[in-house]
Amino acid sequence: MTHSQASASNRYLLSPEFLRKLEQAAIVSKHIMVGRTKGERRSARRGTSVEFADFRSYVPGDDLRYLDWNAYARLQRLFLKLFIEEEDLHVYFLLDTSRSMDFGSPTKLEWATQAAAALAYIALSSGDRVQLFAHSADSGHRSRIFRGRGSAPELFGWLSELRADNATDLTKAVRWFQAALPAPGITFLLSDLLTPDWEPALARLGAARGDACILQIFSREEFDPTARGDLRLVDSETQQAREITMGASVLRRYTNERDALLDAARKCCHRYGFSHLLTLNNQSVEDVILRSLRQLQVIR
Amino acid sequence: MQLLAPIALFALLPLAAAIIVLYLLKPRRRDLVVPSVFLWRRAVQDVQANAPFQKLRRNLLLLLQLAALACLVAGLAAPFFLASRLGGKSTVIVLDASASMNATDADGSRFDEARRRAQEIVRGLGRRDEAALVVCGARARVALPFSRDQHRLLRSLNAIPPTDCPTNIRDGLLLAISLAGKRPDARVYVISDGAFPALPEVASPAEVCFLRVGARNHNVALLAFEAARPPAAPEHQLFIRAHNYAPDTKRAVLSIYHEDDLLDAQQIDIPSGQDLTRTYQLRLDQPGLLRAHLDVEDDLSTDNVAYAFASPASATSVLLVTPGNLFLEQALLVLPDVEVYKAASLSPDDADAAYRDHDVIIFDRVAAPKPPASGAAMVIAESPGPLVASLGPELDAPTITRWDEQHPVLKYVNLGAIQIASAKTLSPALGAVVLARSGDSPLIVARDDPDARILALAWNFLDSDFPLRVGFPVLLGNSIRWLSQTGALAPSKRVGPGDVLHFSLPPDASHADVSLPDGRRLRLQPHDGLVAFTETQQVGPYRMLAGDRQWRWAIDLRSPSESNLSPASELKLGPKTVPAGVGPPKVEQHLWPLLTLLALALLLGEWHLYHRRY
């Protein structure tokens, strides 16, 4: 599938200009992991690339093409030259599709799918393997493993069909996700983390091998509420109600709690070596992917 | 505290009930679906943890609202109280500083009480009000013109001393009215005990308020004390009159002193409202100051003392130098307490001795050989010497057209009808005073030096009908008395508080030192040899020294109007009668602006608390 075909079939997700910019980028993993097939990533394996890695002594059966004859001439011993093996990278996307993501304009879920599509397109363009997971409290969906730019339309189509439903159970989602992983890779978690069990979930994610980047998505109204007066707040997921008189004092306390949550999430990610980025639903996806994630050295 | 519209208070209960009902109603809340109440739950968690405090705070809001409502409703009821505040007035305070104000029936004295009332008025002045101070003693004076400076007014009030003088309230009121008259809406406060007569001639266009001080009339006073020695009598006669103004009989000890020697002391009972008189026959060897003192428990001590001078026991010695004048000799013989010596002439060598031996020398148609350096001389129809006057051209049948009736020599003497055949004009020297003149021609001239007095008459008594007239012995008696006072205890007459005294100092005296009854000393500087003494506000003996000359006088009150301490119930000013009050008239001080401000402050507090909460 050509680039024009991918953009035509998924014009609602990403614009052709954005896709062109994405083709120049690549996802950076902080860890070197073993891939499935030849790719463009450094692998833990020694292989056949042109980049020298190490020497080892010759043992019978080794490919004679990699013998270092110069060393043999000087030292009268046979050494085998080892080269960096370049393999593909597994890139996973875990999207929170609980009802709390169905807020804002665009909704947080719409923003998350756009961001996931953009990141997945980068991965596909780099020859990496991509697999998508969507999870709410009661349901989980996963895509097949996509590889190559030609699979982008299908991936975009899979993302477009995601709908917000049910409550959040992040720990359960991570457990389910980890059980389904074919190989270690880099995981992008797109969620608002507005659940009490966000920290155990991240801890579980951190316990496994692999790299992760947490995109915490808030709606603008959620980040900076503008409603005032006597209100009855209804939780979209649990339908729990809370009576509140929205005034300067309550808003100040809410802001403090919000900042405390964001700070705690940032510190938790740092602890596990994850990247963390807070994004708002009214921010440009292009700007977040190509600038903010680049600053975090998640994208290069 | 009074209310103008108390019916407004009935609105308090229903309005308060309405606020409470509204407060109890649960507010209708708007549903707002949020992604998650996860953060909200944590945000309001600490609020709920302090639930009792929150409840209290909610109640505090209710209490503040109810308090604001109470203030507003109270303001609607228009409460006010009567305050002494003057508000926008020009005020003249007339402070009575007379002797009766020294009565001690008030807290301190009446004057202290009056000063406190004046201070109250000054402190009650608004920032734009002004006040002036007028003090009434023997003379009225403006202690401070109109001023808005309260501190200055209070300082001036505190600096005003009480006096032992009678009240000159008439002048004080006229002064105050003239001050107030220039200002619209002015008010005159008279702070006094009212111990003064009615003032029918004083009419005030300004509002006059009479603030009375004093509560009772417990006073005994000495109203008369005279000492005289009848001619040829060896003893002095003393007359004393005391009066009891108190409502009950007063027992007192009446003591008589000559200088500091006690002559007599006796206990007397004076019935209420009655006089008590006493006469004494006392032999006094020396002239001096007599003092009568009443030792009695009353409210005013100023009038418990009186003074009199005992005249010298010896008679006045008069040397008549005359070729012969039957009328003059007979008239001198008739005069009481006068010893007459006669001579036909006096040589210059004998003159000094004669001036020293005789109190007065009368030169009748005989030229004085020399003027007296110390002593007194009366020169009739001859040259009195260049110190007094020189003789001028002769006048034919002059008529005396003008004479000084106030001079002691011419008191009670009518010179207008005297027929004179001829007289020689007197040209008075510098320092001499013309006492009578015919047209522009002086006929009687006097000179009063510190140690010498000379009287010159320009016509021969025998060439006129003057010896046949009633005025002749009177003039002669006046002249002998005036002339004989040189060098004696002068002035020996009684001096009233506040009187102004004039003295001629000796030429070599550069100043005069006066000892006051309270022990203070004043130094007076003469002008042209004369000093005027005005510090006569205290009762008691005074002494003045100038060079080698000494004067003594004593001041006592002897004023029935000041000694009668009955506080006046009203002040009569012309056609108006001003009732006595004990304080400044009250004005309505409304509280609604204060209450409204308080309600506003409470509502602001409630608003602030509400917004701090939410």
Image: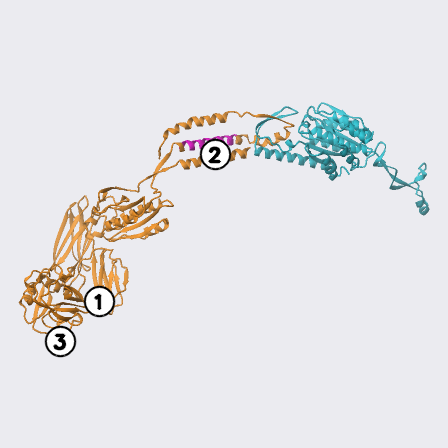
Residue B286 vs residue B204, the one in the foreground: B204
* First of labels 2, 3 by sequence position: 3
**Image disc number at residue B603:** 2
Q: CA distance from mark 3 to mark 1?
A: 27 Å
Pinpoint residue A249: horizontal percent, then vertical percent. Answer: 57, 34
Chain in orange colour: B
Q: Amino acid at mark 1?
A: Arg
- Of residue A161 and residue B318, the one placed in the foreground of this image is A161
Which of the 4 image quadrants contains residue B309? bottom left
The amino acid type, in three-letter code, at marker 3 is: Pro
Question: Which mark, residue B549?
Answer: 1
Judged by its main secondary structure, the magenta piece is: helix
From this view, report whether residue B143 is shown above or below residue A248: below
Which tint was used for chain A? cyan
Tell me the tag on residue B348: 3
Task: Identify which residue is drawn at 23% across, 69% down.
Answer: B507
Residue B79 or B237: which is nearer the viewer? B79
